[in-house]
Image: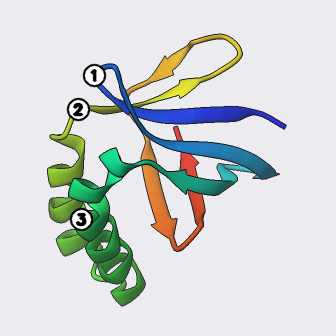
Amino acid sequence: MSEFVLKQDDQIVETLRVHTLDQTYFYCKFEATEAFQPFKSFFEEELKLLNDEDFEVWDKFYNQITNFNLKIVKCESEEFIEDFILHIQNDEAWFRY
């Protein structure tokens, strides 16, 4: 299956190895690099807010994550995706764009 990386500028933050495709989401094995550490608490809080189902609060919080200027890059084509929603839980991640 496909492989993507999450980048900030030219630095790889994590690798996303897709194992399942579902209508709107790519489900991936998540492999963080040291560059992920500054973002870890944000993604933990994002998932907590999402699970609380207070979507107005979640949306405002997720805007903080989008301000990090992260992008997902498809490894085989180097196509980049700037507008996406990414959730991370332990060593699993899922995203859509």
Q: From the viewer's perspective, is 79 left or right of 6?
A: right
Residue type of the residue flagged with mark 2: Asn
Q: Label 2: which residue?
A: 69
Q: Label 1: which residue?
A: 9
Q: Nearer the viewer, mark 3 or mark 1?
A: 1
Q: Label 3: which residue?
A: 42
Residue type of the residue flagged with mark 3: Phe
Type of colouring = rainbow
Residue 38 screen position, x and y as percent = 21, 55
Per the model, the C-alpha gap separating discs 3 and 1 is 18 Å
Residues 25 and 74: in front is 74
Per the model, the C-alpha gap separating discs 1 and 2 is 8 Å
Per the model, the C-alpha gap separating discs 2 and 3 is 14 Å
Element assignment for label 2: loop
Q: From the viewer's perspective, is 78 left or right of 69?
A: right
Verify CB contact (< 8 Å) between mark 1 and mark 2.
yes
